[in-house]
Amino acid sequence: MSGCGNCSGDCQSCGRCGGSYVINEGELHLLKQLAQFSFLPVARSADDVTPVYPEGTEYSQREYSLILQCLEKKQLISIDFDAPLKGCSDAAYGNYPIRGSFALTATGQQVLELLDIQGTD
């Protein structure tokens, strides 16, 4: 995913974006899910650190993995593999030995509040 303008997208609030975020449809979809649920489950395989969200049905697993990585890079969510959710169905996560959760960061919550006020158009 590229950044804004001439930005490479790998900055950490460098200021060249003027504090703005570019959020695509998939990212917005997942952010809205986090507005309904404080935490969502995430997993990964033992030999790959790529996060997966097998419960999602709107996008492919590869797309969900990219969405999660982009949201984390934008510091809108945090992914914690040391905090698995209790009571989650094991059916979708059977192939993934490492399980955790992801949640909105304070910045992610602010972005959602702004989207609620300003809309997404």
Image (cartoon, rainbow, N blue to C red):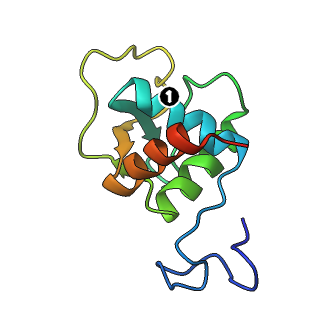
Quarter of image, res 17: bottom right
Which residue is at 52% across, 32% downward?
A: 32
- Return the residue found at the far front: 117
State the quadrant of the C terminus: top right
Which residue is at 34% across, 32% downward?
A: 39
Q: In front here: 10 or 84?
A: 10
Disc 1, SS:
helix
Pointer 1 residue: 33
**Callout 1: 10 Å neighbours few (<14), some, many (20+)?**
few
Residue 14 drawn at (x, y percent)? 50, 85
Which residue is at 38% across, 41% downward?
A: 102
Q: From the viewer's perspective, is 62 left or right of 19?
A: right
Q: From the viewer's perspective, is 53 left or right of 22?
A: left
State the quadrant of the N terminus: bottom right
Instruction: Answer yes or no: is residue 121 visible.
Output: yes
Residue 74 drawn at (x, y percent)? 51, 63
Q: In front here: 10 or 19?
A: 19
Q: How many marks?
A: 1
Residue 66 drawn at (x, y percent)? 64, 51
Instruction: Answer yes or no: is residue 48 visible.
Output: no
Q: Is residue 119 above or below residue 37?
A: below
Q: From the viewer's perspective, is 80 left or right of 28?
A: left
Residue 25 drawn at (x, y percent)? 71, 41
Under mark 1, the amino acid is Gln
